[in-house]
Image (cartoon, grey):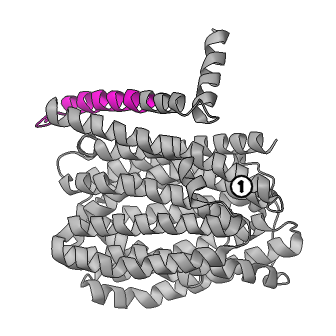
């Protein structure tokens, strides 16, 4: 029953995230052709200010509501009140930080941009807390619809303002419009009004404060990357970095976010059954690895064609960024399952310790890499941080579930080995057959298609071969063959 709920919930969220992120990618592609790289760099710095201000007073009450065994009106009212107060505090902090940020970066435009973006947390703070009841019930259809409606609103505003003004203001106005749509739709899809009240505050504080502190560490790590890059390399290179990174973010939102939401709800519902938690976690990790690793690695391998086709010839740096960011994203996505597990089992403090350590290691590594080797050094520093966080996540899972590091590594072994074989074949084809690359739009599409087809066939063949050699153990191979058999028999 639980497996069916996970698959059904993930399917709904996956469909919603796929559509919304396809729209988001379209929005990025249009904006990239209307605006300059410097505009994206400016927006990246402004969003870093928002991220830090938000993290300082972060209390993820939505996650706390889902994790609670029972939640009534007092809990939902308290969650809404906390969000409203938090939105006001974040907005004030952003306004206060706008002038110092403009001075530090040397760009006076940042003052108006950060001040305008302060409206975004105010709007999101009003979002209906009762909407989280759907997540508690593992009903994700309305969340999928909410994602799509929000993205349609955002892309409409970005394209309209971008075409009319060719100004960077298209980006913040699109974000603010998305916040308005998200908040309004949360009440339309769940017409149940919360009220002001803090009667259940203690229930939220103990759980949420550690998640909030962990988010502070994440925000410091991410913001330091943007500030360092902008300061040392300039807004143009930061903009290219931001655009290249957005492709990795789309992978995270499409591949991981739906599974994370459903698994968090699932782990919360079985948190008292340790054996079942371990079983569900290992199966989920095995399935996620089989999908995430080849997709992210493939995107990194095809970075020149993807950026060339999507953005045109004016974004060469974005290709380099994507080649690094895509596999880095895969590492973070696999490590991210530990977040869902530890938070659902009530151990956010364990995550915070390692997130703080990750941020503390990232900043000096980034500084050394950036000063010594420029953008490439910064990207290697990001990869170093990701690998460190992945190793830390293995220890987090071991502590909260008792699963050994070996057990966690074994379930992703076939997928990792098959991905390495795929990378070797595609790299060899690129060097031996497609040396020099394609220059035309059509040529890049054909080359990307041929390399992708070769990579996919190699990955599937390697996976099935390793499965046979392992004694045909239970796993995604058996499930895929079973589904394929049923489809063929139905023809």
Query: Any magenta on residue 446?
Result: yes
Above or below, 85 against 256 in this view is below
Above or below, 360 against 184 in this view is below
SS of the residue at dot 1?
helix
Q: Residue at x 23, y 30 (%)?
A: 447
Residue 375 figure quarter: bottom left
Above or below, 277 against 3 in this view is below
Q: Depth check: give the residue in front, 116 or 399.
A: 399
Dominant secondary structure of the magenta stretch? helix
Above or below, 233 against 57 in this view is above
With 78 as the anchor, is 39 left or right in this view?
left
Q: Residue at x 20, y 73 (%)?
A: 234
Residue 80 figure quarter: bottom right
Q: Can residue 406 be seen here?
A: yes
In the rendered image, the quadrant that contains the C terminus is top right
Q: Which residue is mark 1?
A: 278
Residue 352 position, x and y percent, is: 58, 78
Q: Depth check: give the residue in front, 86 or 398.
A: 398
Q: Depth check: give the residue in front, 351 or 491.
A: 351
With 371 as the anchor, is 296 left or right in this view?
right
In the rendered image, the quadrant that contains the N terminus is top right
Residue 466 position, x and y percent, is: 48, 33
Which residues are the magenta region? 434-460
Query: Any magenta on residue 63?
Result: no
Count of residue discs: 1
Q: Residue at x 36, y 83 (%)?
A: 111
Residue 19 position, x and y percent, is: 53, 42
Q: Can residue 236 be seen here?
A: no
Binning the other alpha carbons within 10 Å of mark 1 as few (below 14), some (14 to 19) or many (20 upward) gives: some
With 485 as the anchor, is 330 left or right in this view?
left
Which residue is outermost to the left? 436
């Amino acid at each position: 029953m639980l497996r069916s709920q996970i698959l059904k919930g993930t399917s709904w969220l996956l469909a919603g995230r796929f559509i919304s992120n396809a729209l988001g990618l379209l929005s990025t592609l249009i904006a990239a052709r209307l605006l300059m790289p410097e505009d994206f760099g400016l927006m990246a710095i402004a969003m870093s200010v928002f991220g830090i201000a938000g993290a300082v007073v972060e209390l993820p009450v939505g996650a706390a509501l889902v994790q609670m065994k029972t939640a009534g009106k007092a809990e939902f009212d308290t969650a809404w009140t906390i969000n409203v107060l938090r939105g006001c505090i974040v907005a004030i902090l952003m306004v206060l930080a706008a002038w110092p940020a403009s001075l530090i970066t040397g760009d006076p435009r940042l003052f108006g941009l950060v001040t305008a973006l302060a409206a975004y947390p105010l709007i999101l703070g009003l979002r209906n807390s009762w909407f989280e009841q759907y997540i508690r019930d593992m009903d994700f259809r309305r969340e999928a619809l909410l994602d799509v409606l929000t993205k349609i609103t955002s892309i409409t505003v970005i394209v309209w303002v971008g075409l009319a003004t060719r100004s960077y203001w298209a980006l913040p106005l699109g974000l603010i419009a998305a916040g308005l749509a998200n908040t309004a739709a949360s009440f339309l899809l769940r017409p149940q009004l919360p009220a002001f009240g803090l009667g259940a505050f203690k229930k939220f504080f103990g759980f949420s404060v550690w998640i909030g502190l962990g988010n502070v560490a994440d925000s410091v790590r991410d913001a330091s990357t943007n500030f360092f890059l902008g300061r040392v390399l300039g807004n143009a290179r930061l903009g290219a970095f931001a655009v290249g990174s957005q492709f990795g973010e789309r992978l995270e939102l499409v591949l991981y976010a739906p599974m994370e939401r459903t698994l968090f709800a699932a782990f919360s519902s079985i948190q008292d059954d340790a054996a079942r938690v371990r079983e569900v976690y290992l199966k989920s990790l095995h399935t996620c690895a089989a999908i995430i690793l080849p997709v992210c690695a493939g995107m990194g391998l095809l970075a020149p064609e993807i950026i060339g086709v999507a953005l045109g010839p004016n974004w060469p740096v974005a290709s380099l960024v994507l080649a690094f960011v895509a596999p880095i994203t895969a590492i973070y996505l696999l490590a991210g399952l530990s977040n869902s597990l530890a938070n659902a089992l009530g151990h956010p403090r364990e995550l915070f310790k390692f997130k703080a350590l990750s941020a503390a290691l990232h900043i000096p590594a980034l500084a050394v890499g950036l000063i010594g080797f420029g953008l490439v050094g910064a990207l290697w520093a990001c990869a170093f941080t990701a690998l460190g966080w992945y190793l830390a996540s293995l220890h987090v899972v071991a502590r909260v579930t008792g699963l050994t590091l070996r057990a966690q590594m074994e379930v992703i072994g076939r997928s990792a080995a098959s991905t390495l074989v795929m990378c070797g074949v595609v790299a060899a084809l690129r060097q031996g057959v497609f040396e020099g690359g394609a220059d035309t739009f059509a040529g890049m599409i054909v080359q990307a298609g041929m390399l992708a087809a070769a990579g996919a066939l190699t990955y599937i063949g390697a996976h099935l071969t390793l499965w046979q050699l392992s004694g045909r153990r239970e796993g995604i191979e058996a499930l895929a063959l079973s589904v394929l058999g049923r489809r063929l028999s139905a023809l």
